[in-house]
Amino acid sequence: MVQILCVAEKPSIAKAVANHLAGQVTTTSARGIAWIKNYEFNFNFNAWGHSSVCFTSVAGHVYEKDFESRFRDWQGCSPQALFDAPIVTTVANNDKKAIVRNIEEKARSASILYIWTDCDREGEHIGTEIREIAMKTNRRIQVVRARFSNIERAHIINAAHHPFALDERQAAAVQARMELDLRLGAAFTRLQTLNLKPIIKHLLTEEKSVISYGSCQFPALGFVVDRYFRVKNFIPEPFWGLRLSHTKDDIKVKFNWSRNHLFDRMVTTILFERCLTARTATVTSVQTKATSKWKPLPLTTVELQKMGSKYLRMDSHRVMTIAEQLYTKGWISYPRTETDQFDPAMDLRTLVTRQTQDPNWGLFAQNLINGGFNQPRSGRNNDKAHPPIHPVNYVVGTSLTEEERRVYEFVVRRFLACCSEDAKGSQTTIHLLFGSEIFSATGLIVLARNYLVVYPYDRWESSQVLPPFIHGETLVPTELRMEEGQTTPPGFLTEPELISLMDANGIGTDATMAEHIAKIKKRNYVMTQPRGRNGGGGRGGTGNADAPAREGQGGTGVQEFIPTTLGVALIEGYDKLEFEKSLSKPFLRKEFELQMRAICEGRSTKNDVVHQELEQYQEVFVKTSQQMGVLKAVRLFPFTTFRSCIRNSAMDSCVSDHLIEYRYRTREC
Amino acid sequence: MPPPPPPPIPSPELLSTLQTALRTAHLPPTTTWLKTFLTSTRPSTPLPALIKTATFRLLTSDITQTLSAPSSHLFPKDLHGSAAAPASRILKGPITVMVLDIQDVGKSQWSQIEDLEAQARGESKKGHEMIRVPVELATTSTSTNPNPNPNPSSTSTAAVTTTGAGAATASSGPFKLHLTDAACTQTYAFTLSPVQGISAAMPIGTKMLIQNVEVPRGVLMLEERNCKVLGGKVEEMEKAWRAGRLGRLKAAVGVGEGDRGGGG
């Protein structure tokens, strides 16, 4: 019988996969490390026939990279030496040593090494580490890897029968990233700490803390600081608008001004007067058309993180941890994916069927099976590794923790929504020409809620019913008002916004963004608070064109970020250096991320990328050290929060016309 | 020794032909300007080229110095109200006017300040999120007239425009303009509906022709049908305006220079 050694990335996966493959399992602990188990059983692989299998695991990366010991001492070398100091690879600790020994032993008698690490870049790299260990004791061992994206039984068995080769390019990209992160992180952290610590000691929580640098964390912090200053520097301005309402058939219809509002009182007043002079308005169009609210796209990691902070009362890091657990237990598919399109060949109906037993959404799922099923929409992204996040198996909510239940429910509802139909409605738009001005009113009637039934995270409600208007009809509007308002500052950056910014600017990958955000919090560069406590929370009809749309409708628990004095000082310092590619800006990191992609696609090599990137950053490093004075000179103003609540005086003044009373007044806040 | 060539004396016919042509183009120059102009051109220049050059120079001049229009082609003296002036009237024109200032009243001044400062840092926005772009991409939107050729060939006389309609300035307005006529009477105008050629990138000193325009409370209501952008600009005015724009916006909202991010 062929002997096959299977190695997963973590013990939970080894256990789950072994149980799917095996009829009968013998479980033993690896020598010297009780929590790593070896599962032994027989399995009939398509490729090798009846085989004797030993399924074990590592626990993440086995090896650790660090500088040679003489470079580890802060006083022993200049930080700049770290750009080319020799790097040594070690096995981190005794646990990892035991893991290595276990694989070495098991590999000796095996003829095939079957790698079951997660299918992403990190997983590919861990796969190469496992290969290295196994080949130490068995140079002729044949190495293959399984490709899988969830821990569902049929999927796993199918993966077992179809081995692939390790993707060397992805592994090389990880190597490049690790080396760069180590060198850049260490060099800049030491430079900053050595120079700045004496000045900002009082801001550090612990005596021994360092002012750490990370090439993703700094741009992320940069976004937070940038928004903070937009809020802080914001100056409210008045604006004026016209509001028309007309009562017909006892229904008061509110019309919006096509110009919305203008930042000039004189002009608005003139337009207002011209309307009054015109006296009658003409209905220039009445249009009723079918409209729909599109069902959501299949779920990606970034989207899951954003929705998590919006609706599930968890930050992105927490959502990912929970999703990770659900994946390991086999309830949902791999939660790290950029793909927002389902492969047409995928059997989605079966997945829907599994949800029919749920007391809450079971009926909805059943209706999909009974003919309501629609193929999900396809987004534009496909990482060619994993499908969108979807439920794999059904689990009763009560057997999950509260947080797991919330995330699982979201994943399921999202999936069912994807398989459902767009919500349908009918929208009527009426345009009025009054003087030279155009006013419009819309009425929406939701005809079929469809996906909305199962997806409460979206809202789409019928509006008031419009009375009938006829094209060409003239009318004397009941009321026209000129109103004054004031612009309000944007809110502090929320986590969903930060994720969008990082995503759009190539800071980190979908898999690492949440970690970077968690890190800048941990390092005391930013703090969080629930949205709306301070600053520009409410935003009704503001002049802020770029105010985030429809953010947290009160108490959904969206967190917003505020930089600490330390965070502000660091970013201000780097901004003041005025490099073309500042560390506080995303440009450098974006290039870095693109280079990683280039390695994965075979357009570049690890050595070229490392060399090129080090050169770029070294240039910044040299300039930074030369201008340390600028960095040190940054003022450390005390942290403050803002209460820029805007109030308008409710001043009424009346202008009356002979027939109708028009009110011309400022709006109450 | 041959006598020096006599200074060219423009024939009266040439003078009057030119004058007629320029009047038809709604750019009637003062006699002084015309004479100075003719002394700076070669007598052998064919008439069509002469007209084009004159038109171009007038478009790039300050019309309060160079044009001499009959009162029917000027703003009425009581434009800004007198006891007798109506609250709203129609100006028949045609009146040649020059732009002294343009303001986007559809955007808050603060957001315009933010845009200008971001532009200066080489950053821009794409979509609704803030996205940073390398400096090379952003600078194109601040460059000015690429064609300062004083002797334009063919028909490009009216086409002195800037390329300045960059991403940040592609606002649809509406705009409030500060205008002057040839006799230094100044007034505001508002783009009631979009007018081709009027944008935030429009150079200061642009000449426009207005006709049959409605003027409530002394403010011209500009529309495509009553306003034609003739083009041109006045280099010094334009430069001074661009240079002072951020400062003016800041003064308007009440921030001094020297605050964080000030000056770019």
Image (cartoon, rainbow, N blue to C red):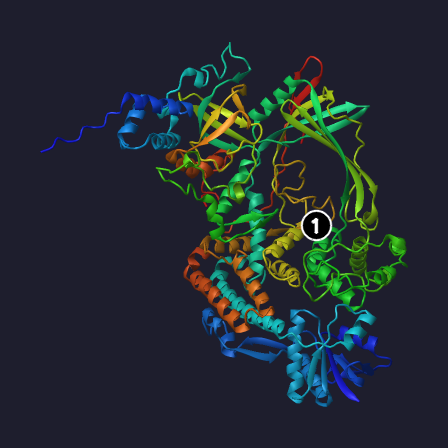
Does residue A104 appear to the left or right of A582 in the view shown? Answer: right
Does residue B43 appear to the left or right of B176 in the view shown? Answer: left
Q: How many marks?
A: 1
Tag 1: amino acid: Val
At 49% across and 12% down in the image, what residue appears?
B82
In the rendered view, tell whether residue B85 sits above or below residue A492: above
Is residue B120 at least partly visible in the picture? no
Provide residue A129's location: percent of width, then percent of height: 64, 79
Provide residue A100's location: percent of width, then percent of height: 67, 83
**Label 1 is found on which chain of the structure?**
A
Image quarter for residue B44?
top left
Given the current orientation, which residue lies at the most extreme top position? B84
The foreground one among A134 and B44 is B44
Provide residue B101's location: percent of width, then percent of height: 46, 31
At 65% across and 74% down in the image, what residue appears?
A167
The foreground one among A642 and A430 is A430
Does residue A519 appear to the left or right of A69 in the view shown? Answer: right
In the rendered view, tell whether residue B87 sits above or below residue A599: above
To which residue does mark 1 refer? A558
At 68% across and 37% down in the image, what residue appears?
A540
In the rendered view, tell whether residue A456 sits above or below residue A244: below
